[in-house]
């Protein structure tokens, strides 16, 4: 059974017009559809990568899944049960089970907490164990992420480097013994030279502890490396999903093709055709109901703006793309 | 609060002792201010043992003459009043009252101000609106008419003077701390605390509060200074507690005696004390302000 299921998950943000526009021009508020009808499932021990350009709704999805932001529509189910409107002990259980690793290690650690207290904060807040046990586990967790507790426990965040801080962030999530880890671009703020080390740590921990992950990045080469499955998003919509290797080697969706075309390919023989993309990425403000990629898609036709294509969940080996002209594009050899 | 939380209640709250030391020694003025405060505190604590006379005891000099309106001398280091009261003794005992009023009303007002500010800033929305409307109303309230009404209703009692001072003073700290809480709330480590399961209470008092601590200490010092000035003005205008003696009260009695022009020494010592203590508090709080607001450091 899927550990986590997102069922037509949507989130829109209201853009309230200014007072003058509202009163004099009678302008109605418009909506940014940051995430629209996103349906995916994550299996036991699986790493689902989410790729997409800036502003496509990756972080919004992560904050909804971690329970920090309410969706405007749709549902999130954890082991079959909806998490929306959970109260009391049930929400505490979910908070423990699903942990987030933040993007910015400089902003996400409380500057007035000692390192050991940052790691111990989750267990203390949820009263998972007794005080001594929490301390013991927190110190052990620091050791496990490569920060010898004797040296680091009593320090403050500003005394650590970016990579060390990100390790603290990882420790503070893993000490909760989560079942799902949400990592929202955990490497992007780090120096290139230390990314590999943090990535190895994440992989190692996953292998050792066996949790499922939602791993967000706009670096496809990293995702191809770590993720079992890959979801490609564009302006809030799912464009393509499937086994990571297959999506990268054999993309179906015009957008994914373009995206992968923009990534350097190490093997010179496998040069790919790149469909030319017109125009600029925009914000999904009051968009038409259909395919969000239509304004830039070289294959778009009149019906693209009309119909929304839903992805199937359940079968994780399925490679699917949300484009209604897939066959035509393939047949025409475009 | 369970045992696991309780034992670590204060872990984020403490500014390390070394940090205080560094802040106070960061410049000459705050060092000076710190020692003035220490001296006044010691005087206040030991007042009954330090004062050679009762504050309302008629004194006689070594030759047995009634010591009325004597300028400072070896016998009466700060002179005497027209009724022969020893001003040195009065000053020492008044230090106790003034400091007590200053510290108690400063402390209560910062506790109220901090809580109102933190809660309004953190929750925002309706809660914020209601709390800030209340502070606005208090802002519109002038101090003197307010204390006159209060004293008229309840009499010249220390408790009511403190109450009046607190009601007037907490509003400024509430506003400043609210603004600070609003900006800290946006920081990502608050999101992280939420993601780890921290309750609103925990976020406000364990995560935000330690980050407004330097500002809080700054305003605590500020509030004490304001309380002292406010008490002095109230006492000088005759709204002080008649049973105890304070610096402002000493000036009030000078005024009543009609000897203002003659007895400069009677006027000098309480005024100098008020100025010295208030200025010292400002010096120390300035040093804390540089921690709270690093942009000042460059100047
Ligand atoms: N609180 C908010 N209010 C209004 N709009 C928002 C809010 N949060 C996000 N958005 C908008 O929603 C869209 C998706 O944002 P999101 O942060 O999820 O993107 P992202 O994929 O994480 O981008 P990045 O790669 O830059 O982190 C953006 O257009 C953004 O401007
Ligand atoms: S649905 Fe239409 S616009 Fe969207 S990718 Fe397919 S062809 Fe292009
Ligand atoms: Mg993001």
Image (cartoon, rainbow, N blue to C red):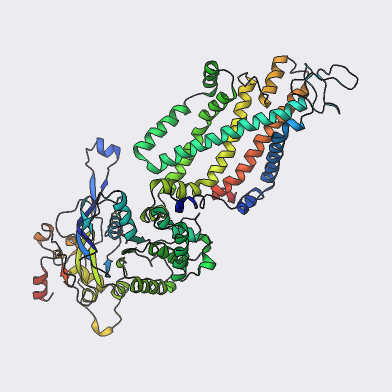
In the rendered view, tell whether residue B266 sits above or below residue A333: above
Instruction: Look at the image and tell me whether residue B279 can be seen.
Output: yes
- Left-right relation of B243 to B170: right
Asked whether A118 or B228 is in front, the reply is A118
In the rendered view, tell whether residue A219 sits above or below residue A9: below
Q: Quadrant of the N terminus of chain A?
A: bottom left
List x then y, in percent, for residue B84: 79, 18
Asked whether B49 or B117 is in front, the reply is B49
Q: Residue furthest bottom?
A: A269
- Left-right relation of A93 to B271: left
List x then y, in percent, for residue A189: 41, 65
Q: Residue at x 79, y 28 (%)?
A: B52
List x then y, in percent, for residue B179: 45, 42
Which image quadrant for residue B135? top left
Q: Tag count in the figure?
A: 0
Instruction: Look at the image and tell me whether residue A106 can be seen.
Output: no
List x then y, in percent, for residue B150: 52, 20
Asked whether B147 or A254 is in front, the reply is B147
Q: Residue at x 70, y 18 (%)?
A: B253
- Left-right relation of B263 to A139: right
Asked whether B10 or B72 is in front, the reply is B10
Q: Quadrant of the C terminus of chain A?
A: bottom left
Which image quadrant for residue B45? top right
Which image quadrant for residue A29? top left
């Amino acid at each position: 059974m899927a550990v986590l299921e997102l069922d037509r998950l949507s989130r829109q943000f209201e853009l309230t017009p200014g007072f003058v526009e509202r009163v004099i021009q009678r302008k109605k508020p418009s909506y940014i559809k940051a995430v629209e009808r996103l349906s995916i499932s994550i299996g036991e021990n699986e790493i689902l990568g989410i790729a997409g350009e800036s502003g496509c709704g990756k972080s919004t999805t992560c904050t909804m899944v971690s329970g920090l932001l309410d969706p405007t529509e749709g549902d999130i189910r954890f082991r079959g049960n909806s998490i929306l409107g959970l109260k009391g002990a049930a929400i505490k259980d979910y908070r423990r089970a699903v942990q987030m690793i933040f993007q910015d290690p400089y902003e996400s650690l409380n500057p007035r907490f000692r390192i050991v207290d940052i790691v111990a904060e989750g267990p203390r807040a949820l009263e998972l164990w007794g005080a001594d046990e929490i301390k013991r586990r927190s110190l052990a967790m620091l050791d496990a992420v490569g920060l010898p507790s004797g040296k680091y426990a009593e320090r403050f965040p500003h005394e650590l480097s970016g990579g060390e801080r990100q390790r603290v962030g990882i420790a503070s999530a893993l000490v909760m013994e989560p079942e799902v880890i949400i990592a929202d671009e955990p490497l992007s703020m780090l120096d290139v030279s230390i990314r590999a080390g943090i990535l190895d740590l994440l992989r190692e921990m996953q292998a050792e502890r066996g949790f499922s992950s939602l791993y967000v990045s706009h670096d496809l080469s990293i995702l191809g490396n770590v993720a079992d499955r890959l979801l490609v998003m564009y302006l809030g919509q799912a464009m393509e999903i499937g086994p990571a290797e297959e999506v990268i080697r054999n993309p179906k969706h015009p957008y994914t093709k373009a995206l992968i075309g923009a990534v350097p390919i190490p093997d010179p023989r496998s040069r790919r055709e790149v469909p030319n993309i017109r125009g600029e990425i925009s914000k999904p403000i009051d968009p038409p109901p259909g395919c969000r990629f239509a304004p830039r898609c070289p294959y778009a036709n009149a019906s693209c703006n009309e119909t929304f294509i839903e992805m199937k969940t359940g079968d994780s080996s399925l490679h699917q793309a949300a484009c209604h002209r897939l066959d035509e594009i393939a047949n025409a050899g475009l | 609060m369970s045992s696991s939380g309780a034992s670590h209640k204060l872990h984020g709250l403490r500014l390390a002792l070394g940090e205080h030391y560094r802040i106070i020694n960061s410049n000459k003025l705050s060092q000076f201010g710190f020692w003035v405060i220490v001296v006044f505190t010691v005087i206040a604590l030991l007042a009954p043992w330090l004062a050679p006379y009762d504050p309302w005891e008629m004194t006689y000099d070594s030759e047995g003459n009634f010591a009325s309106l004597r300028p400072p001398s070896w016998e009466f280091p700060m002179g005497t009043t027209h009724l022969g009261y020893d001003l040195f003794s009065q000053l020492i005992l008044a230090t106790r009252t003034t400091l007590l009023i200053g510290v108690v009303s400063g402390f209560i007002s910062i506790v109220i101000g901090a809580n109102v500010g933190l809660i309004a800033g953190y929750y925002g929305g309706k809660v914020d609106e209601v709390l800030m409307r209340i502070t606005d109303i208090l802002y519109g309230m002038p101090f003197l008419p307010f204390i006159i009404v209060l004293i008229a209703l309840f009499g010249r009692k220390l408790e009511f003077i403190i109450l009046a001072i607190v009601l007037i003073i907490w509003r400024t700290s509430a506003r400043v701390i609210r603004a600070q809480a609003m900006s800290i709330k946006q920081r990502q480590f608050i999101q992280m605390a939420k993601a780890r399961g921290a309750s609103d209470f925990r976020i406000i008092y364990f995560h935000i509060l330690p980050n407004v601590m330097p500002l809080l200490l700054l305003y605590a010092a500020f509030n004490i200074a304001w309380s002292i000035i406010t008490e002095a003005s109230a006492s000088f205008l005759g709204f002080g507690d008649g049973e105890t003696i304070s610096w402002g009260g000493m000036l009030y009695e000078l005024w009543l005696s009609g000897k203002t022009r003659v007895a400069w020494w009677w006027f000098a010592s309480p005024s100098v004390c008020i100025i010295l203590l208030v200025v010292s508090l400002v010096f120390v709080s300035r040093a804390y302000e540089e921690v709270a607001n690093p942009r000042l450091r460059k100047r």
